[in-house]
Amino acid sequence: MARRSDHSREEIKEMALIAAEKMILEKGLSGLSARKVAQAIGYTVGTLYLIFKNLDDLILHVNARTLDRLYQKMTADKPLPSDSQNALLQLAQTYISFADEESQRWKIVFEHHSEEEHTPNWYMERVTRMFTQVEKHLQALAPHKSAVEIKNAARAIWGGVHGICILAITGNLGVAGVESVDDLTQSLISNYLKGFTSN
Amino acid sequence: MARRSDHSREEIKEMALIAAEKMILEKGLSGLSARKVAQAIGYTVGTLYLIFKNLDDLILHVNARTLDRLYQKMTADKPLPSDSQNALLQLAQTYISFADEESQRWKIVFEHHSEEEHTPNWYMERVTRMFTQVEKHLQALAPHKSAVEIKNAARAIWGGVHGICILAITGNLGVAGVESVDDLTQSLISNYLKGFTSN
DNA sequence: TTTTAAATTGAACAATGTTCATTTAATGGA
DNA sequence: TCCATTAAATGAACATTGTTCAATTTAAAA
């Protein structure tokens, strides 16, 4: 039952998100506005509000795509590391370089708190999916640990990597450059693992 | 050379910041507006702009005060822990409960990126001051380590604690409750230290 | 009292998110 | 071919925002 549209709802949604991402890339969240997105895709604000509940909703969708991109990088085939520990270090490095190269997009994932009471499931799944990657290697590294222990370790490590990243990017770390961030996370992970695997 | 004012510049500044903090406490950053702050302190927007460069500047001052509060909690006299490791764990706990109890204020410290090219010194000092606390205990714990090693370890640990905190609060950790966050950081720190002190 | 100059105002501007009555146009039936 | 139906799309309207700055008020100095 297609109507007047040159584009389906899905197509408009896609166009809007791409336009939004471009604006975010150029000027961050403050460069984004409903009218600008609408104009960029050749529609009016009204149409945008038929597709997204509000701007927050649009941003949540942008963030989901950011998580998708990150996940893709994390699971992309790379020269396979010799052991699980190196695999984890490599994951961290992927995370850091993503945060560095796409910092504009990446920051928004943690800046933006939807007014919604509950983050929707389709979004949360993208979050937990990443932890699963970490858990996989931890499991291999410490087969004697329980599922809960692995789950917690994954969150501790990943939270740690993330924290170093975000402090660095927001200028709250007092160090500069990707290399320093890399060093810090490598130290965090290897020291943590030493403790984790020894009991 | 006092003029018309019932209040000095400093007094108005203080009043404005207190009013802003109240609004942030109630509705977060989105509850804050120049006009509202002005009205709350019995002045007009114009006056506010004589004292703060812009809203970003005002928020930066709020954040500085948040860091002050946190620092105070971190350095408040507590039952002295038996050893440095426990002192670090206690610091982390202080951090977490602060982030939990004053989450509204605390979040903004990392949400808000000033448009300024360079974060002012008076602000950065408040940031590094906190790392110094961590370094103090690390130094005692591993006297054979170099100053640089201590400095990096402090940033790795503190970044880690912070990351777990912020993922939890933004709902990106997939766990709930302060206790879980506490567990994760305790595990992060003790495992890290085990590795750190063993070489 | 008059002059001076700092302190304070608030109207004005451009831009924002969001809504919804109105208009446009594609489709199915006559 | 024309009409009625109904979804798609519009854009004016509203309240609110950050920010500026000419105009006004007022305290102190002369």
Image (spheres, coloured by chain):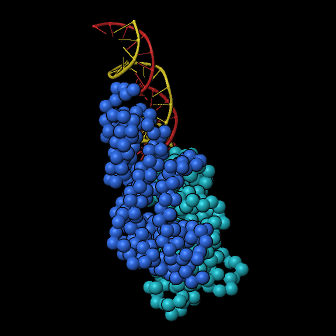
Chain colours: A blue, B cyan, C yellow, D red
- Is residue B199 depicted above or below B153 in this figure? below
In the image, B142 versus B32, the foreground residue is B142
The residue lying at 36 percent from left, 34 percent from top is: A8
Residue furthest right as drawn? B79
- Is residue B4 depicted above or below C18 in this figure? below
Corner quadrant of residue B139: bottom right
Q: Is residue A25 visible?
A: yes
Number of callouts? 0
Position of the N terminus of chain A, as image quadrant, is top left
Residue A17 screen position, x and y as percent? 37, 45
Residue A46 screen position, x and y as percent? 41, 32
Residue A180 screen position, x and y as percent? 39, 76
In the image, A125 versus A103, the foreground residue is A125
The residue lying at 52 percent from left, 85 percent from top is: B196
The residue lying at 60 percent from left, 82 percent from top is: A199
Residue A13 screen position, x and y as percent? 39, 40
Tell me: A194 left or right of A97: right
The residue lying at 52 percent from left, 45 percent from top is: B35
Tell me: B1 left or right of B25: left
Q: Is residue B127 visible?
A: no
